[in-house]
Amino acid sequence: MNRLHVLALLGLFMAGTAQADIYKCTDDAGHVTYTNDKPGPGQKNCTLMSREQSVSTVTMPKRAPAASTPTPATFPKVDGDTQRARDNDRRKILETELGNEEKLLEEAKKALAEQESIRNGDEKNYQRVLDRLQPFKDKVALHERNTEAIRKEIANLR
């Protein structure tokens, strides 16, 4: 065995488990302090905590399921035909909004492509180009998010 192995084994044999005494101290005002320092002559009411104290666990009480409240008899009800008509109107409105957003998205993409093809002479630093293009990129991202949200809402319809 070489010297490094001998030192490693010696270190393993000498290493023990670390343990610290924990003291619970209460001052005259009733404030409780826990410390691993041995109490000094000025500290009063300090007791050594047991190392083998059991750990207490807290169990939360189970909640009863929420009681369902019946719909009041005076609550307005809608018949099936009226609800279907409302759903169809909603679908038409969403499809119109989707068409408008898709048109705005195409316009924003076209404007971005136009701006990307332009190179100004004062933009020798590429960061200036990026700064000029950022509002156009933001507009494209906004319309993409809007179209995605409208598509998701249409998919959630009955």
Image (cartoon, rainbow, N blue to C red):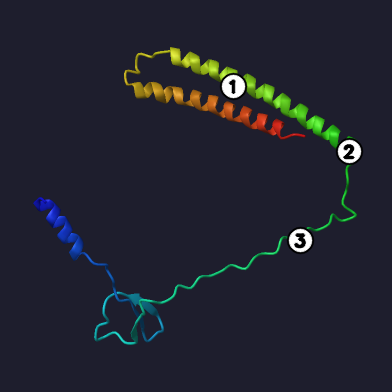
Which of the 4 image quarters holds residue 143? Answer: top right
Q: Is disc 3 surrounded by few (<14), some (14 to 19) or many (20+) residues within 10 Å?
A: few
Q: In this view, does 27 lie above or below 16?
A: below
* Label 2 sits on residue: 80
Q: Which of marks 3 and 1 is nearer the N terminus?
A: 3
- Residue placed furthest toward the left: 3
Residue depicted at 56% across the width and 69% down the height = 59
Work out which residue is located at the far front of the displayed protein and give it. 1
Confirm or deny contact between disc 3 and disc 1 (CB under 8 A).
no
Which amino acid, by three-letter code, is at mark 1?
Leu
Q: Which of 124 and 72 is in front in this view?
A: 72
According to the image, label 1 marks what residue?
105
Q: Are marks 2 and 1 in contact (CB under 8 Å)?
A: no
Task: Provide the secondary structure element on which disc 1 rests.
Answer: helix
Position of residue 84 measured from the top left corner of the image (x, y, whole percent): 85, 34
Which of the two discs, 2 and 3, sits closer to the camera? 3
Residue 134 x, y percent position in the rendering: 45, 26
Q: Mark 3 points at which residue?
A: 67
Classify 10 Å Cα crowding around label 2: few (below 14), some (14-19), many (20 and above): few
Mark 2 vs mark 1: which is more N-terminal?
2
Write the residue at 76% across / 61% down. 67
Q: Whole-Å distance between the Cαs marked 2 and 1?
A: 37 Å
Amino acid type of the residue tagged 2 in the rendering: Gly
Horizontal side of 15 relative to 74 (left or right) equals left
The amino acid pointed to by label 3 is: Ala
- In the image, taking residue 99 as reference, residue 56 lies left or right, namely left
Asked if labels 3 and 2 touch by Cβ distance under 8 angstroms, the answer is no
Q: Residue 104 versus residue 62: which sits nearer the camera? A: 62
Q: State the quadrant of the C terminus.
A: top right
* Residue 30, quarter of the rendered image: bottom left
- Secondary structure at badge 2 equals helix
